[in-house]
Image (cartoon, rainbow, N blue to C red):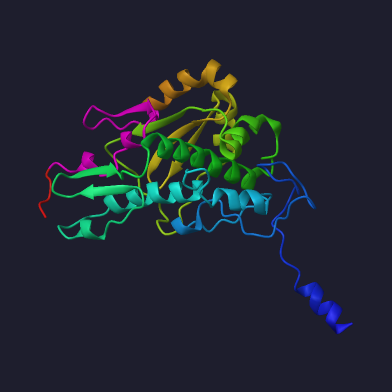
């Protein structure tokens, strides 16, 4: 009797609500749900634990496949680069910068992708990682991530099919998150209602804002007018080069925060 009770207590915890994986759409017993699925990568400080992400899909997002770096890893590397260069750096700070993807040349104040990585692959993997985090956060809040309206997102993230649009907001003022150690992606009723209307979700993370094309049909009808309206609300006219542009290359992003550096520091 005691052994049976002890065995029962040792059963692994299952991270499920609907019981169907939001990515591959499989259920038990075909798949298991025993590994913690972090909404944001744990390596970036994410501490929200999601659910209905099977162990097979969870493992897929955490490992490199077919010469492509893992989505978790790409997301962490890109946003850690943002974090590093947004600090108050001194002439010795650059020596602490380490990245799997990028080399930093301090004298030239230049960052480049390492020769063993392809910029187009990094760009696509980063885009996929944004949608990957989006659907997990949406399901975390609504428990409705299994809905077939997200099939295009599933195909892009899990099976690398399609290429939904991503727009990046460039401002000369960046609002830092309140919780720098444990960042979160906002998700609330107003954002969801706007997404249903415009087809776009405003993905704000660690001070950077992207708009993700979630519903192509809604975007084709209302998306551009919605973005135009957003320019009036979110762009802060300081220099005159602020704008919203379609994100197509990882090097379009201002990694070095040069917008804030009128003078370059010599080593």
Residue depicted at 17% across the width and 58% down the height: 90
| Residue 42 drawn at (x, y percent) | 50, 58
Query: Taking 9 as reference, is 163 left or right?
Result: left
Residue 130 screen position, x and y as percent: 49, 40
Q: Quadrant of residue 249?
A: top left
Left or right of residue 176: residue 194: right
Can you name the residue that lies furthest to the right here?
Answer: 1
* Magenta residue check for 254: yes
Q: Nearer the viewer, residue 211 or 124?
A: 124
Please tell me which residue lies in front, 188 or 89: 89
The C terminus: image quadrant: bottom left
**Span of residues in magenta:** 233-262
Of the 4 image quadrants, the one containing the N terminus is: bottom right
- Kindly identify the residue that appears in the image at 36 percent across and 27 percent down: 244
Q: Position of residue 242 (x, y in %)?
A: 29, 29
The quarter of the displayed image where residue 173 is located: top left
Above-or-below relation of 130 to 43: above
Q: Position of residue 156 (x, y in %)?
A: 57, 34
- How many numbered discs sit on the rendered protein? 0
Seen at 40% across and 34% down, the residue is 120
Question: In the displayed structure, would residue 203 be above or below residue 179?
Answer: above
Judging depth in this view, the residue of 110 and 218 nearest the camera is: 110
Main secondary-structure element of the magenta-colored stretch: loop
Residue visible at 60% across and 28% down?
Answer: 196
Which residue appears farthest toward the top when viewing the image?
221
Q: Residue furthest bottom?
A: 2
């Amino acid at each position: 009797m005691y052994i049976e009770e002890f065995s029962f207590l040792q059963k692994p915890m299952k991270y499920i609500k609907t019981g169907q994986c939001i990515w591959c759409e499989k259920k038990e017993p075909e798949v298991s749900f025993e590994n913690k699925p972090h909404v944001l990568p744990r390596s970036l400080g994410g501490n929200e634990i999601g659910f209905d992400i099977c162990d097979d899909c969870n493992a897929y997002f955490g490992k490199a496949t077919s010469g492509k770096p893992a989505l978790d890893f790409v997301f962490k590397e890109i946003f850690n680069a943002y974090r590093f260069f947004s600090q108050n750096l001194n002439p010795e700070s650059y020596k602490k910068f380490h990245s799997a993807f990028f080399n930093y040349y301090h004298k030239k104040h230049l960052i480049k992708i390492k020769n063993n990585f392809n910029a187009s692959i990094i760009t696509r993997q980063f885009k996929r990682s944004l949608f990957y985090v989006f659907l997990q956060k949406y399901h975390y809040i609504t428990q409705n991530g299994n809905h077939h309206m997200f099939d295009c997102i599933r195909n892009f993230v899990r099976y690398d099919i399609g290429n939904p649009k991503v727009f990046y907001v460039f401002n000369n003022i960046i609002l830092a998150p309140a919780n720098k150690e444990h960042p979160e992606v906002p998700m609330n009723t107003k954002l969801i209602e706007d997404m249903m209307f415009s087809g776009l979700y405003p993905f704000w993370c660690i001070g950077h804002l992207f708009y993700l094309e979630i519903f192509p049909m809604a975007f084709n009808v209302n998306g551009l007018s919605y973005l135009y309206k957003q320019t009036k609300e979110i762009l802060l006219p300081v220099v005159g080069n602020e704008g919203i542009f379609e994100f197509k290359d990882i090097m379009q992003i201002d990694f070095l925060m040069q917008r804030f550096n009128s003078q370059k520091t010599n080593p």
